[in-house]
Amino acid sequence: MFILMVVIFVLGYAAIALEHPIKIDKAASALLIGVLTWFVYVMNGQDILALGFSPNWNDLIASSHGAEHNIFHFIHGELEHHLIEIASILFFLLGAMTIVEIVDRHGGFKIITDKIKTLNKVKLLWIFSVLTFFMSAALDNLTTTIVMLALIRKVMADKEDKWFFASMVVLASNAGGAWSPIGDVTTIMLWIGEQITAQRIIMDTIIPALVTMLVPVIIMSFFMKGDVKPAVVENSDEDNGESITNGQRNFIFALGVGSLLLVPIIKTVTHLPPYMGMLFGLGNMWLATEIILKKKSSAFKKKYNVIGILKHVDVATIFFFLGILTAVAALQSAGHLDIVAGYLDENLGNIYLINIAIGVLSSIVDNVPLVAGAMGMYDVYTPEMLQALSTTDAAYYSEFVQDGNFWKFLAFCAGTGGSILIIGSAAGVAAMGIEKIDFIWYMKKISLLALAGYIAGAFTYWLMFA
């Protein structure tokens, strides 16, 4: 049954990858593997936990009262624990998507799109990639991807062009998020856990991250030719003589961007989860739009108020996230991911090879549990702890001090390696859901580019610090 959980995950993963050929929406496949893995786990909990691979179960039975602990209650508690983390991501995503949709519906992105005069593919590639790289460090890679996808839709019309530019945005947002303590959920985890400090992660990983973004862009600059087909400009902000004024449009844009920028600040000041800051921003925008629309007609309000806009938010993407993260949580709780992490440590024994492997794995399995597993495997060593070790061991574990190369390189690899496959990062999953990007298309067109950038960035880091 332990192996059956892996089989279910692999089959579901294949169904997601073959979404278009088999004509089954990936959200349905994701939900099924998310639920079925937990079904197998809870129905066969005694046998699975008896194998001794679940780290939390082993800790529990080692305690004085652990032997009497009911297995069902343990698995139920594990599910609730993971549900808190998953819900945090889903509420964050829902809030971000709604804020972007509000700005888009009110024409706020015209401030940016009106300044993009070129339709040349190479120029647009550089504009979107560089803009995304730095935005994702200030916001985070998921929010930035959602914002940039809205801009892409305003600039170009062809589906293939939108898929390509959306994919390059995923690469740039993951690279940009890897060098900022608030740019990716994994860097946030390591920052909060005090494995890294904000100053060192920025200074030591910005150059490798920049290389990771630039290599795919430079490669494609030699092959891309021509212009994109411009998007059709819709005069959607006028209804029966009523319209959103330029002042109101600019205000909504400023409020939307300000709300997104406030999220990391609120998180730093209050130490509350990021979704609380996102929901705070959504509440402010909801209130502002209600005031703006107060004297408008009922038909106009129906089109522009948040209740009407919510109907256009892509809920299928939320369910896709829910299914994937739930399935990964089952594998983490049962101990599958701990086996993988232990195998890497035992057979590679080199911090650079371990982290490169974790980065590649993060393109298949969510990087959050992989990083969490690595954080659980290793202590943050202090000078006093190193003094108690032999010379050989002290040399190896000196990489595990705060701001040691293991932790910084882990943040880089886990953040950028997920770009190799589109479901390997939150940004990729969001792009896949919003633009309906085909998994196989991404593998054929983008995966090698992402791998080239990942290897180049990792090699750059190795040259700098090895």
Image: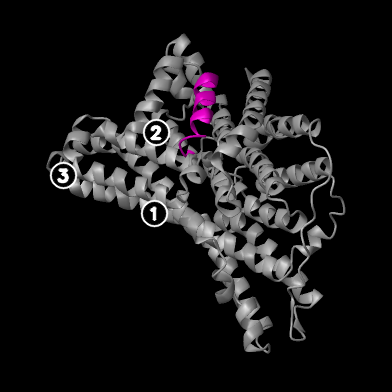
Q: Nearer the viewer, residue 395 or 101?
A: 101
Disc 2 target residue: 376
Mark 1 falls on what kind of element? helix
Tags 1 and 3 in contact by the CB under 8 Å rule? no
Q: Position of residue 212 (x, y in %)?
A: 68, 31
Q: How far apart are the two marked residues, 1 and 3, measured between alpha carbons?
A: 22 Å
Disc 1 target residue: 84
Q: Tell me: residue 167, above or below residue 413.
A: below
Outermost right residue: 117
Q: Earlier in the sequence, mark 2 or mark 1?
A: 1
Residues drawn in magenta: 351-366
Q: Earlier in the sequence, mark 3 or mark 2?
A: 3
Q: How far apart are the two marked residues, 2 and 1, measured between alpha carbons?
A: 19 Å
Q: Does the magenta run of residues contain 116?
A: no
Disc 3 target residue: 69
The answer to whether residue 272 shows anywhere in this view is no
Q: Tell me: residue 368, above or below residue 275.
A: above
Q: Position of residue 194 (x, y in %)?
A: 51, 38
Q: Nearer the viewer, residue 191 or 364?
A: 364
